[in-house]
Image (cartoon, helix red, strand yellow):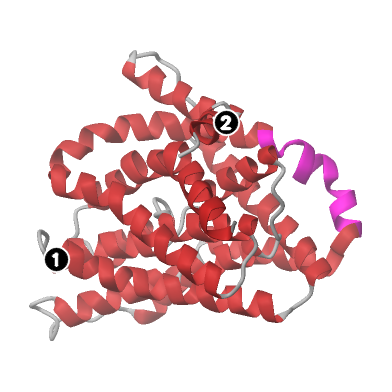
């Protein structure tokens, strides 16, 4: 593997900010970002990336390539929780296996944004409609995870989900709603809207991403302590399953003819794990599952692995198979 890809990724300011946040915790610095600010930055990043996706979708139109990509996104969001559930069942009960499987079936928007930043730095083009794939992959895993709980838990006959609440949490949670809403705004306003919001959606973007990843570094380092509860099995799972998922994603991307930039973003979506939307839904609907297992594996292991090693590794594999 070309080490320069990893070095190039690490020397990206947002990734360096992530390391700085982790280092602050390890060195017991009192560095802290007030709670409302990271939430605001998260909403900003979702809005900016969604708006850009809508504008790009206007340019590309609804082609066969776009439709195939969207179908592939939904397919992966549905099948990843199923096979990861049966892998996890080897060591875990059905509640925890389903919660973690749903976490890994969904996506991390910040990992996607970091990957798009990496591609921009390398001068590799990608299509803005990949944001639509991001939005589509957020929710199905939650529903699949809850179906798995229904099917494989001992008290399934007594267990009743409030499906209206479940579906609202899955499809109308803040991240999905803002992504889809800003995507539609981009579609309706097109190039005029993109020019009008340039100082907000373009000039500020990488500065906000850098500061947000600083906060993510602080959070990830604090979550490392929870890994003692997960055991070696889950730590290995959190490193190896993203590689497996990315591999499946790359095979699909190759089969439907995605260009290299889109293939990387798709593989990153397949490889990432949700540490915001799915944990919120699982706490609401599967209280028997231990949050420290599905949050710490996604945030303290898979997220750092993907943004430091995974993204350049997936691009390296793409360079081999697409050449």
**Sequence-wise, which precedes: disc 2 or disc 1?**
2
Region rendered in magenta: 192-206
| Residue for point 73% across, 57% down | 51
Residue at 67% over, 76% down: 65
In the image, taking residue 256 as reference, residue 232 lies left or right, namely: left
Callout 2: SS: helix
Instruction: Please identify the dominant SS of the magenta region.
Output: helix
| In the rendered image, the vertical position of residue 71 relative to residue 108, given as above or below | below
The answer to the question of whether label 2 and label 1 lie on touching residues, with beta carbons closer than 8 A, is no
Residue placed under numbered mark 1 in the picture: 89
Q: Which mark is residue 8?
A: 2
Q: Where on the picture, by quarter, is residue 121?
A: top right
Residue 307 location (% of width, % of height)? 47, 40
Image quarter where the N terminus lies is top left
Q: Residue at x 33, y 39 (%)?
A: 300
Residue 247 as seen in the image, left or right of residue 145 = right
Residue 279 visible to an observer of this rendering: no
User: Observer-nearest residue: 259 or 273?
Assistant: 259
Work out whether residue 237 or residue 288 is closer to the camera in this orientation and state it.
237
Q: Nearer the viewer, residue 225 or 231?
A: 231
Q: Is residue 300 left or right of residue 307?
A: left
């Amino acid at each position: 593997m070309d080490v320069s890809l990893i070095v190039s990724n690490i020397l990206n300011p947002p990734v360096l900010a992530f390391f700085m946040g982790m280092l602050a915790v390890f060195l017991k610095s009192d560095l802290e970002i007030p709670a409302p600010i990271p939430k605001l930055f998260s909403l900003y990043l979702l809005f900016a990336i969604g708006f850009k996706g809508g504008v790009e979708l206007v340019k590309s139109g609804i082609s066969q390539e776009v439709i195939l990509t969207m179908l592939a996104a939904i397919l992966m969001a549905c099948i990843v929780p199923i096979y990861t559930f049966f892998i996890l069942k080897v060591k875990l009960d059905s509640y925890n296996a389903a919660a973690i499987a749903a976490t890994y079936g969904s996506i991390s928007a910040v990992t996607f944004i970091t990957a798009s930043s990496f591609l921009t730095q390398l001068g590799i083009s990608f299509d803005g409609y990949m944001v639509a794939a991001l939005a589509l992959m957020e929710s199905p895993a939650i529903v699949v995870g809850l179906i798995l709980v229904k099917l494989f838990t001992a008290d399934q006959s007594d267990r009743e989900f409030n499906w209206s609440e479940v579906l609202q949490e899955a499809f109308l949670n803040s991240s999905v709603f803002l992504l889809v809403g800003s995507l539609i705004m981009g579609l309706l306003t097109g190039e005029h809207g993109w020019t009008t919001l340039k100082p907000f959606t373009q000039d500020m973007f990488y500065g906000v991403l850098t500061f947000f990843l600083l906060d993510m570094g602080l959070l990830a380092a604090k979550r490392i302590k929870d890994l003692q509860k997960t055991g070696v099995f889950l730590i290995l799972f959190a490193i190896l399953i993203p590689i497996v998922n990315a591999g499946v994603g790359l095979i699909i991307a190759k089969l439907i003819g995605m260009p290299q930039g889109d293939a990387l973003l798709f593989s990153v979506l397949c490889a990432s794990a949700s540490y915001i939307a799915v944990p919120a839904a699982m706490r609401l609907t599967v209280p028997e599952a231990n949050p420290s297992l599905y949050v710490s594996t996604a945030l303290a292991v898979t997220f750092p692995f993907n943004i430091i090693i995974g993204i350049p590794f997936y691009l390296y594999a793409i360079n081999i198979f697409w050449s």
